[in-house]
Image (spheres, rainbow, N blue to C red):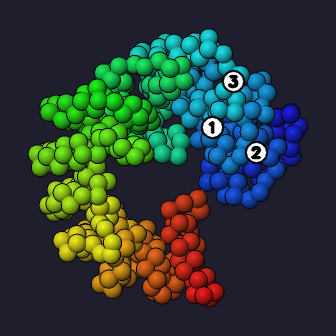
Amino acid sequence: MDTDPSNAVDVDSALISAVRARDTDLVRILLHEDCDPDLRDAAFCLAVRMHAGHIAQLLLQYGADSGQSRQEDLLPLSKAVDSGSPALFEALLDPRSRGRYVESELLDARALARHWHETGVETELRRRTDSRDAVVRTPVQDDEYNYVDEFTLGDMTVRDGHGAILTYIEELLGIRPSFEELMDRALAHADQANHTTWSSVTILLAGRRDQATWSTAAALRTSPDSSRRLFGAEVLRLTHLLDDSEEDAFADAALDIFTDWSAEETDSAVLAEVLVALGEHTDPRAEAALLPHASHTDAQVRSAVAQGCGEWSSPPAFSGNARTTLLRLMTDPDTVVRKTACRTVAVGRDKDPVLADAMAALLDDADRLVQLAAVYGLALHGDERCVEAARFLGPPQRGCLEEEGYLDEAWRYEWRQERP
């Protein structure tokens, strides 16, 4: 197949134009329509050549077939590594096209990624450009969930996701780095929220699900370095969360360690991670350890409490203490805390009218997303007040999946009322 958009499809097609404009939201909207498969494949090749990894992955999610792409229409693996974008690199190695890359190419890509990671993006940029000008550093979204920093020097721009690229290649090659080596990769980005290297490392270690990895992560609980404690807590939490086996071998150990940990942790970010972990356990001890932190001075911690209240609550109702806590957090000064508490009540099985009235009160909130969360909750609770509120708030903002989800639930409620 000729995957050059100027030959395979109309160059003025809306999808191709949206990819050229790097308009991720518009690409997503257009992909909701049933566009021609050849058009999706051509758009994928264009996104790869433009180094638009997020868009390339989005096209793959909506049916683009990377296996139909000619090698010359994409990028060499070395160029993808040089870009520093894990999203772009992983799009090239999509399972449908992975077989075209021999082991020697992957090994060369690994060596290059390791060089970038160990040398540092800024140092390597200066070596390649021979420039002493100021480097511009900007946080950017690399894929649907993760961020990286983007460095620009002269006419060269590189992202700092080489640690994640290195981790991904090693997993494909069956190479098993030590816990300490992987942790060092993640900690290099400890000051960057949702950095893709941190998340790829913690998920990889959690997936090992062996006692040695668990014990090493658990030992970080006593580290004087809060970044190491946070790393250990996340690995432990994900080990339990991602274990879909019937044995769930680490469930009891996770509950024990997080219950004790929550009573002694002093760092707010680490405590929030610990409380989120507690909220993923269906055990009364989780509630008892979680609720005392509802009045914490840090909003991130209070939000973790609000999130956790819904996971362990069994039908048909919240416990009295949990309900009181959620009602209070729905009036919290912090916007994220109010929205999180409202969502917890929304998806809970407790249909007490007091909770519905509390959500209805949030229809007058100063923040639009809190209002929409209240609409969503009222719709799930079968409360007709969601209909007028949804109409008042109007259509979702372009490209905002969260708003779309909230308003869709109100639409489904109205549809059910009209078609009993």
Quarter holding the N terminus is top right
Residue 334, placed above or below residue 45:
below
How far apart marks 2 and 3 lie (CA) works out to 21 Å
Residue 197: x and y, percent? 42, 31
Is the Cβ of the residue at disc 2 closer than 8 Å to that at disc 3? no
Q: Determine the secondary structure under disc 2.
A: helix
Regarding residue 130, the answer to whether it shows in the image is no
Q: Nearer the viewer, residue 117 or 149?
A: 117
The residue tagged 1 is: 52
Residue, x 82% and y 43% (percent of image)?
38
Residue 360 in which image quadrant: bottom left
Quarter holding the C terminus is bottom right
Residue 26 in which image quadrant: bottom right
The residue tagged 2 is: 40
Residue 153, placed above or below residue 244:
above
Label annotation for residue 99: 3
Circle 3 residues within 10 Å: few <14, some 14–19, many ≥20: few
